[in-house]
Amino acid sequence: GAVVSQHPSRVICKSGTSVKIECRSLDFQATTMFWYRQFPKKSLMLMATSNEGSKATYEQGVEKDKFLINHASLTLSTLTVTSAHPEDSSFYICSARPHSAGSYEQYFGPGTRLTVT
Amino acid sequence: LAKTTQPISMDSYEGQEVNITCSHNNIATNDYITWYQQFPSQGPRFIIQGYKTKVTNEVASLFIPADRKSSTLSLPRVSLSDTAVYYCLVGDKDGGSQGNLIFGKGTKLSVKP
């Protein structure tokens, strides 16, 4: 149980275009989902916290108008990178926190490799 | 959120026991300690979580002293496939907190034959 999927696993786009990444909790409901970015050989950096039915909370330095997050249901959150540029190329990872979590649990997706040319 | 400090890297050989220690001097009363494993180009995988004393599962053991200012992840008899980055995190228990996870730099474990 507790499987999180991401789609697509890899995407290549041209500079200036927008890319949408989906994060789904497959066998549980997630009130909260998180989006991370990881550059090569670096640690994960939290970008934003996504709550179902409300606006996402962005970490300092993350542009909310560039990284649009929509958490429309208890099993789906999307991250849209708008007007992508080469510096946005990175590994994007989501995680989901079970709705009924009694302790501190998060389950991570497999990640999405974004390359902007 | 409590900051964590881990060794940047560790080397080991197959079959050995590996202990990775994490310091978290500012851990809060409600914080749990969680360890994740990450392989290249994959999302982190939950290994173990604890609050105090000792926790053991089929993969690892977690030792937490009484003051909770540090914790040690113990991997018994490692194999080549245990080569990965291991992250120690502390975070709030459910009950109002969003449960934000802040990743430190992690420990890159290299297991050699």
Image (spheres, helix red, strand yellow):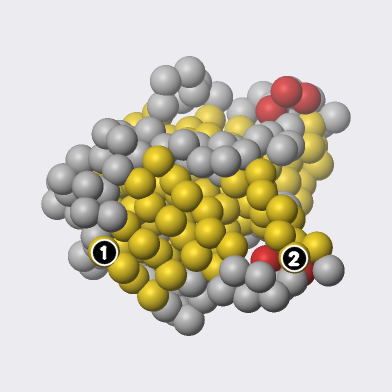
Find disc 2 in the rendering and name its residue.
B13
Visible in this render: residue B89? yes
* Depth order, front residue of B98/B54: B54
**Residue at 28% across / 55% down in the picture?**
B65
From the viewer's perspective, is B34 left or right of A12? left
Q: Callout 1: helix, strand or loop?
A: strand
| Viewport quadrant of the N terminus of chain B | top left
Please tell me how crowded label 1 is: few (under 14), some (14-19), or many (20+) other residues with Cα within 10 Å.
few
How far separated are the C-alphas under marks 1 and 2?
28 Å
Q: Mark 2 and mark 1 in contact (Cβ < 8 Å)? A: no
* Depth order, front residue of A22/B80: B80
**Residue at 59% across / 69% down in the picture?**
B17
* Amino acid carrying mark 2 in the image: Tyr
Find disc 1 in the rendering and name its residue.
B53
Q: Quadrant of residue A13?
A: top right
Residue B70, image x, y percentages: 35, 46
* Amino acid carrying mark 1 in the image: Thr
